[in-house]
Amino acid sequence: SAWREDRDMGQPATLPSSEAPLKDLYEIGEIPPLGHVPRQMYAWTIRRERHGPPEDSFQIEVVPTWELGEADVLVLVMAAGVNYNGIWAGLGQPISPFDVHKQPYHIAGSDASGIVWAVGSKVTRWKVGDEVVVHCNQDDGDDEECNGGDPMFSPSQRIWGYETPDGSFAQFCRVQARQLMPRPKHLTWEECACYTLTLATAYRMLFGHAPHDIKPGQFVLVWGASGGLGVFGVQLAAASGAHVIGVISDETKRDYVLQLGARGVINRKDFKCWGQMPKVNSPEYNEWVKEARKFGKAIWDITGKRDVDMVFEHPGEQTFPVSCLVAKRGGMVVFCAGTTGFNITFDARYVWMRQKRIQGSHFAHLKQASSANQFIIDRRVDPCMSEVFPWAKIPAAHTLMWKNQHPPGNMSVLVNAPRAGLRSFEDVLEASGAPAL
Ligand code: NDP
């Protein structure tokens, strides 16, 4: 491969840091000499015949370490983030990753923190030893959207770890160089690994769809305000001077969401207007409208009788009709998912008469991800890591999320970081007993 040839020519700075014997395979948490790429690695793989719940679909295998293209980077994964991509990839829904990348196995994991371990021959921005976080957008970089447009509109746009097979639930992951961003040094490896996917998605939802980008003084309703996306919807909007109404389903989350900066919190369990919109003018419809108006009134109690400028939507089928009702005239419902179902419905009359915008949104391009990352580096947004799991518990962590039994915020798993709480490569070497650099 290109990078192996380059290494043979001695180009990248990939010399081992010690005289330690080189091996073909290292145990999890055993750190190879800096820049030494073993032939094989441990990974949690998904195979098509195992599609199903996380505990069935994920399995540990020894697989070949990825070869690099000229613009690729190999990252030694310290920690990885848990998010819905792993659940969807395991289930094979809404699409099976195998129908996209056609590889025999899939390694999920769309969030990572780690250390640059090898670089392709054309990579100049990053070098071996750099400490990084990874964002999950990939593209081929050669069309007009990638060059002066919006890379998220490129026909080659794909999500790493879902539409590509080389994600972060493995000792090494393979990424495009333009997926890397500097790591906030004040955070631990696991904190660094938990936030990028949800943070950058929330950033594009709030600020990426002009002229409906949220502005100081405006109001935004954030569904699942204590969830992975929601904690960033709340914090980013609040940091920008907007007012947030957060939705929860459990009173134990109320103070958490308020402390993130929400102006008010609504418990969705107090209302019964969920699911697909009933047939217009049926008794069920009349009941639904009554309940939805009650929900609207709860919003008004927080905003002082102002409708929300934006609805930050992702539950989908269960909440979409209400989202479209409560957005203000000329306002926007922006959505990036349909967690509760894809058959979304809404009362079309309210959308056209009140000229509301319904906007799909998907992850973020590098500039958006990087601007979002800066909020973390500047300590204006907290990663909200709720729990960190060991490597062996990767399927269990996904099951918790799938069942909506996970704690508020974002979850992480340790991959090569030998324990939680470490904040640098030196910390990792010390904790794993490897020779210092
Ligand atoms: P989380 O599970 O962390 O949070 C989702 C929140 O939604 C929960 O905390 C829950 O809060 C709320 N929720 C659950 N069920 C319902 C319901 N029936 N009605 C209303 N709210 C509900 O997940 P994430 O925030 O990480 O992800 C959410 C979705 O967004 C997933 O489908 C994910 O795949 C998608 N996503 C899409 C991205 C993209 O780029 N397109 C990127 C990131 C995520 P509560 O019970 O308190 O209301």
Image (cartoon, rainbow, N blue to C red):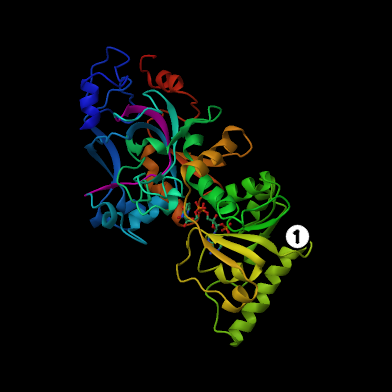
**Dot 1 surroundings within 10 Å: few (below 14), some, or many (20 or more)?**
some
Query: In terms of secondary structure, where does tag 1 sit?
Result: helix
Quarter of the N terminus within the rendering: top left
Quadrant containing the C terminus is: top left
Say whether residue 113 is magenta.
yes
Q: Which residue is drawn at the image coordinates 51% and 46% (left, top)?
A: 200
As drawn, is 165 to the left or to the right of 218?
Answer: left
Q: Is residue 325 found left or right of 199 in the rendered image? A: right
Chain part drawn in magenta: 104-120
- Observer-nearest residue: 246 or 117? 117
The answer to whether residue 271 shows anywhere in this view is no
Residue 279 placement (x, y as % from top left): 54, 84
Q: Amino acid at mark 1?
A: Thr
Quarter of the rendering containing residue 273:
bottom right
160 displayed left or right of 42: right
Asked if residue 56 lies in the magenta stretch, the reply is no
The x, y position of residue 246, in whole percent, is 65, 56
Instruction: State whether residue 81 is above or below residue 39.
Output: below
- Looking at the image, the residue that sits furthest to the right is 304
Residue 89, placed above or below residue 135: below
Check disc 1 and report the residue beneath it: 303
Q: Position of residue 192 (x, y in %)?
A: 49, 35
Task: Kindly tell me whether residue 289 is visible in this rendering.
Answer: yes
Answer above or below: position of 433 versus 111: above
